[in-house]
Amino acid sequence: MSGKELLVVTGLSKTFRIHQGGRKAEVKALDDVSLTLSEGETLAIVGESGSGKSTLGRTLLALDRPDSGSVLFDGQSPFDLKGDQLRRWRRHIQMVFQDPYASLNSRMTARQLVSEPWQSHRELYPTARERDHRSDQLLEMVGLKAQHAHKTPRAFSGGQLQRIGIARALALDPRIIVCDEPVSGLDLSVQGQVLNVLKDLQRRLGVAYVFISHDMSVVRHMADRVAVMYHGKIVECGPVDSVLDTPSHAYTRALIAAAPSLSSL
Ligand SMILES: Nc1ncnc2c1ncn2[C@@H]1O[C@H](COP(=O)(O)OP(=O)(O)OP(=O)(O)O)[C@@H](O)[C@H]1O
Ligand SMILES: [Mg+2]
């Protein structure tokens, strides 16, 4: 992919101060992280538990504020914005979470879940008729049917729920979606289906993904490039085949060696 550069991240650092056994300690969750993301591309983020992947994802959405460094989407930093401007900035970068059961309100119908982001972006689909029409379209784009629109989460399988999570992330027509382990909570048999929904949407819409995963076979299937995180730093970043086939950093080699080899998707 060689689309226009959408996101330019420079020198992000973030330290958490924690209490551990009565003592104060510091965790450097992000340590001078820089990366770029172009239109329509997928950048995977891999690394062991605690290496800072989710903190990076949250910072890209301006849900966490870094101690230093910058996130520029289309040249604009969310940390310089507030109010209406920040609200408009947020539209462009959305998130799909690991656990759709926990991240989707169990009392809302599929249509309500997909429509909820429009409550703070009324200008997109001003009338109820437009919103209903668009939410049905979005459900269909992720492989669900109109008859699913009025069901609540307990009527859905994990894979179907994650499809709703994806439809919801698409509601504001984002240019970037951060997917934080989007299939690792799902049965192996449906992981491939959900990944293919994401791939299909990318082809149709040109959306770019930051794809956080610990599963190297998933990363190979999904990503154009991969960044390897270790203790809050990106230790290696490059095209997915070259990083996975000929890793240059000892940590990447250890990570690949430790990964269980799964049958290809
Ligand atoms: N809100 C917080 N308060 C204190 N420490 C935090 C907070 N969020 C993250 N951390 C710490 O920052 C480090 C990075 O956490 P993060 O959740 O980003 O890792 P991760 O790579 O996503 O891990 P996992 O693969 O387990 O999801 C960890 O040591 C974590 O304990
Ligand atoms: Mg995480």
Image (cartoon, rainbow, N blue to C red):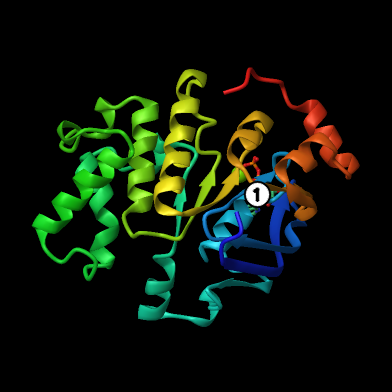
- Within 10 Å of disc 1 (Cα), the crowding (few <14, some 14-19, many 20+) is many
Instruction: Work out whether 227 lies above or below 214.
Output: below
Q: Quadrant of the C terminus?
A: top right
Kind of residue indicated by mark 1: Lys
Residue drawn 27% across and 46% down?
Answer: 138
Camera-side residue of 260 and 243: 243
Q: Quadrant of the N terminus?
A: bottom right
Spot occupied by residue 96 in the image (x, y as percentages of width and height): 45, 46
Residue drawn 33% across and 60% down?
Answer: 172
What is the secondary structure assignment of the residue under circle 1?
A: helix
Q: Which residue is mark 1?
A: 53
Using residue 172 as the reference point, say whether residue 66 is left or right of it. Answer: right
Using residue 41 as the reference point, say whether residue 85 is left or right of it. Answer: left
Spot occupied by residue 123 in the image (x, y as percentages of width and height): 22, 71
Spot occupied by residue 134 in the image (x, y as percentages of width and height): 20, 52
Using residue 24 as the reference point, say whether residue 265 is left or right of it. Answer: left
Instruction: Work out whether 186 lies above or below 202.
Output: above
Q: Does the beta carbon at disc 1 come under 8 Å from ligand 1?
A: yes
Instruction: Work out whether 198 lies above or below 12.
Output: above
